[in-house]
Image (tube, helix red, strand yellow):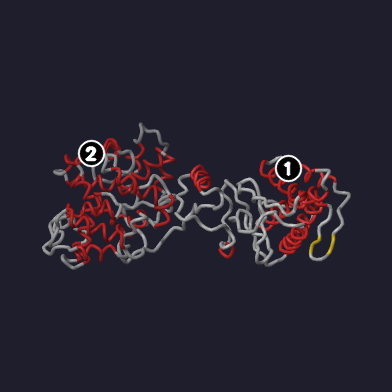
Amino acid sequence: LKSSRQGWGSVRLAFARSLASILLWGGRRGIFEPTWLTGAPSGGCVVTAAQTASGAMVLSGATAPYPQDCGLVTAKLNEFFWEWLMQPESAQLIRQIIQNAEDPNAEVAAPSSSPHHLHLRASPSSGRPSPPGSPHRTGAGFGRGPSDDLAVSDSASSGALSPGQQHSPPASPVPSPSPPKDTSDVLSPAPEHPVNPGPGPGGVSSSMQASNAKTIPRFWWPKRDQISELGQEYRDQIHDIFVKLDIKDGIRTWDQCEQIVTDVFKLSKYFAAPIFHRMKIFYDIIDRSSISKRDAMMTPTPVPITEMMVIGWANGKIQPDDPTLSFFSVVKKDHNEWIEKEDFDIFLFAILMTHPGLDFLLETQEFQDRYSDTVSSRIFYIYDRKGTGRIHLNNLRRYSPSVIDTWKQLEECDDMKMIRDYFSYEHFYVIYCTFWELDSDHDFLLDKDDLLKYDGHALSRRTVDRIFSETSCKFTSAVPGKMGYEDFIHFLLNDQD
């Protein structure tokens, strides 16, 4: 290196360009604050970095003197320089520069791309450097004379200080902040096939390796709040199910709708009967006043529901790639933007009528009603944190355990003892029996004396008075000084939480 002044100068110049791009990009995006180097804004930091690496650098037509009194700057940048110099890609670059200095006419292959190494390549047409991590271009590389390198240096310098210049982050295996929309074109082009990042940083790392670290894969999608029209692929799936089940004149019973609900709509099979009921109401096959009548839900339809009728109902209600949005749209009333407790009635009744683990409740109407009240109260305890009696779409996306996933687990478990969240019959039985024991007169209301017996008189009189003051939570019993069953469920869940 010492024997070739031209080669050594090229090495320092290449390092200066790389470091200047890193510091300018990071300073403009707020990743780090460069004032720890010089106490100056990010532009001054970039100038100092370039000067330290190459001695002096022409910026905007003026040569800034090297600050001789910044020992910390010199030491830190020397550390950066030697760390850069020890990279295998840097060694290959240096060999190419030396070879170019010895024989300027020699053709040298451009260095390969790496997630740890920055390549600033000039465009043959404009002479401007390409963003770090961009694909190789024909004629780019370091097989040029000293004048070309200087031209690239001037272009890079002026571009670094240009206020309108857009910069791209260096390619890195670590997920970086999403660039602004107006700089999306500066990033490397997307791969030919979409990359599924997978869960967590591991998925991003593997996809980065699959694309040679040239493209940052998409790892975030905005949440939808509006349902788009049902896509053609889902329409074809509905048609295939009609053909498979040999349904020629249309759907007449709710169980014929089950495969469409699970395979196309991506909802639990226990939504089949309620959705079939909603379709009958949507097409005025039955009276709209029977929307909440349980008996009408399981009866066959007098008018068959055709394939086009299924698609027509699903448009605006079903988003197959977003089950949470579909769940919210199907359960709520059409004129509301939230879910109320009564909206769950027909969906819970479908579970009571069709789930094999609850067959023993078919002849006990009272236990069916109490089970439905318990499940809906537990759902609202998780999702209605403000006690408004409403569940919005954001609540369904935010809180866990997911009621959508738990509803799907019912398909896999015939024994309700295996379900621990929301639908557990054992939990319901404990809650209901505890309430029944405290309700001495069995009027389905608890007063202060009844609640004092809870958990072996574990609550003090002052605690009970505080609960019945309804300061923290209003009762829904509509009877002053009395706690209803749903109020007791809320109290018990808080006590056990």
Within the image, what quadrant is residue 150 found in? bottom right
Instruction: Give the percent coordinates (x, y) of residue 18.
Output: 71, 52
Q: Is residue 332 left or right of residue 23?
A: left
Q: Is residue 436 above or below residue 333?
A: above
Mark 1: give few (<14), some (14-19) or many (20+) Cα within 10 Å.
some
Q: Nearer the viewer, residue 400 or 159?
A: 159
Instruction: Give the percent coordinates (x, y) of residue 93.
Output: 70, 47
Query: Which image quarter is the C terminus in?
Result: top left
Residue occupying image coordinates x 35% and y 31%: 456
Query: Which residue is most to the right?
Result: 68
Which residue is label 1 attached to? Answer: 85
Q: Nearer the viewer, residue 486 or 155?
A: 155
Which residue is label 2 attached to? Answer: 414
Mark 2, secondary structure of its residue: loop
Which-is-in-front pick, marks 1 and 2?
1
Q: Is residue 443 left or right of residue 1?
A: left
Residue occupying image coordinates x 35% and y 36%: 454
Mark 2: give few (<14), some (14-19) or many (20+) Cα within 10 Å.
some
Instruction: Give the percent coordinates (x, y) of residue 104.
Output: 75, 53
Residue occupying image coordinates x 79% and y 62%: 59
Query: Which residue is most to the top?
Result: 456
Q: Are marks 1 and 2 in contact (CB under 8 Å)?
A: no
Q: Is residue 301 left or right of residue 18?
A: left
Is residue 435 visible from the viewing direction of this image? no
Mark 1, secondary structure of its residue: helix
Under mark 2, the amino acid is Asp
Instruction: Give the percent coordinates (x, y) of residue 48.
Output: 80, 54
Q: Nearer the viewer, residue 463 or 90?
A: 90
Under mark 1, the amino acid is Leu
Residue occupying image coordinates x 16% and y 39%: 360
